[in-house]
């Protein structure tokens, strides 16, 4: 099979498009022929070695956690899926080595859910990390409820745009930070946009004089400090990028594979309550370019690799 691998940590120049042996199909594993792969910041952070201190990894290393594709074969203990089924997955394993930037992926059943028919391949490939992060942060960590107001930082990005829709589906009021050029886009998602940068707290209080009930940080740094000053309860902040938030009484969220959570966000898409804005697509062979664009941090929606 063709795959994207790295043999050492580094910049985009260490990325190789090469041939690898087809993966083995374990007893509780599904072999998926990949159609689309979402590109996420964690991918290039792994490439640069930033997670080497917390996650075991082996070279040659295939990056990627997201996938959408078609089941080709199933292990002997698998009853949930059959060849021909269309699935999505957040395929993060205990060791970072055999990721999803590949034509074939051996995915444990615990990492998969059925693909929403309402999404095309690119949209489906961009859903797992963003959808799981939103679900686990907003519901699991923050306990967001109907009628509450949540502040979401970087609301127009790949995770932010999905998180806004998950929050809206929960019945929450959403205030989202973004550049002015993304405000119309956010209004289309049912979000009240505010410009990030100096004076952010005042702009949020102009919309919510009593502050907000919860905050989701997708930026880190000053966004955490601003949120703490706006929260009615300082404990109701979750961050996916700044683990020091725990020292302030908040929650740090590192997305976990969970088939029930993944199925929940898939149902939102199937019911028309959630779309996946796709900013751009690249062929698998151009993964380095896709990661470079993702690292710029200015993309509206998801960047996705398409696998022929």
Image: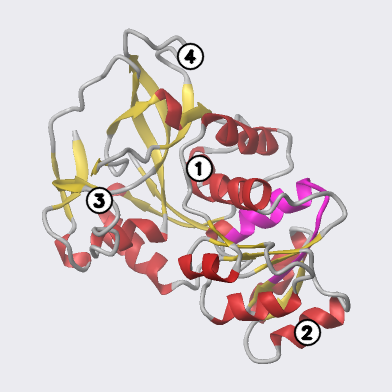
Give the residue at mark 4.
Answer: 80
Give the residue at mark 3.
Answer: 285
Task: Give the residues in magenta.
Answer: 160-176
Q: CA distance from mark 1 to mark 2?
A: 32 Å
The quadrant holding residue 274 is top right
Q: Is residue 177 magenta?
A: no
Residue 158 drawn above or below residue 199: above
Image location (x, y in percent) of residue 189? 74, 58
Split into 4 quadrants, where in the image is the C terminus? top left
Which mark identifies residue 203? 2
Q: What residue do we see at 52% from left, 28% from top?
A: 113
Mark 2 vs 4, N-terminal side: 4
Left or right position of 288 against 13: right
Mark 4 vs 3, N-terminal side: 4
Residue extending farthest bottom: 198
Image location (x, y in percent) of residue 223? 59, 77
Give the residue at mark 1.
Answer: 128
Q: Secondary structure at mark 1?
A: helix
Q: CA distance from mark 3 to mark 1?
A: 21 Å
Q: Secondary structure at mark 2?
A: helix
């Amino acid at each position: 099979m063709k795959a994207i691998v790295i043999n050492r940590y580094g910049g985009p120049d260490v990325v190789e498009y090469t041939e690898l042996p087809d993966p083995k199909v374990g007893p509780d594993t599904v072999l998926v022929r990949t159609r689309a792969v979402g590109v996420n910041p964690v991918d290039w952070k792994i490439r640069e070695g930033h997670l080497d201190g917390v996650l075991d990894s082996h070279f040659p290393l295939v990056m990627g956690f997201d996938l959408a594709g078609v089941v080709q074969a199933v292990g002997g203990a698998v009853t949930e899926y059959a060849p021909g089924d269309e699935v999505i997955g957040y395929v993060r394993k205990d060791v970072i080595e055999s990721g999803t930037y590949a034509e074939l992926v051996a995915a444990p059943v615990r990492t998969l859910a059925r693909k929403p028919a309402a999404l095309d391949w690119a949209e489906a490939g961009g859903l797992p990390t963003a959808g799981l992060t939103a679900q686990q942060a907003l519901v699991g960590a923050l306990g967001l409820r109907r009628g509450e107001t949540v502040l979401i930082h970087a609301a127009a990005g790949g995770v932010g745009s999905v998180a806004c829709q998950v929050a809206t589906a929960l019945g929450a009021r959403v205030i989202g930070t973004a550049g002015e050029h993304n405000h119309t886009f956010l209004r289309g998602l049912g979000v009240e946009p505010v410009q990030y940068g100096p004076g952010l707290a005042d702009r949020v209080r102009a919309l919510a004089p009593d502050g907000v009930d919860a905050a989701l940080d997708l930026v880190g740094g000053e966004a955490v400090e601003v949120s703490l000053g706006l929260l009615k309860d300082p404990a109701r902040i979750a961050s996916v990028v700044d683990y020091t938030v725990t020292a302030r009484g908040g929650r740090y969220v590192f997305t976990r594979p969970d088939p029930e959570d993944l199925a929940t966000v898939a149902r939102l898409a199937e019911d028309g309550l959630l779309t996946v804005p796709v900013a751009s697509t690249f062929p698998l062979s151009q993964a380095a370019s896709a990661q470079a664009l993702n690292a710029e941090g200015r993309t509206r929606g998801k960047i996705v690799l398409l696998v022929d």
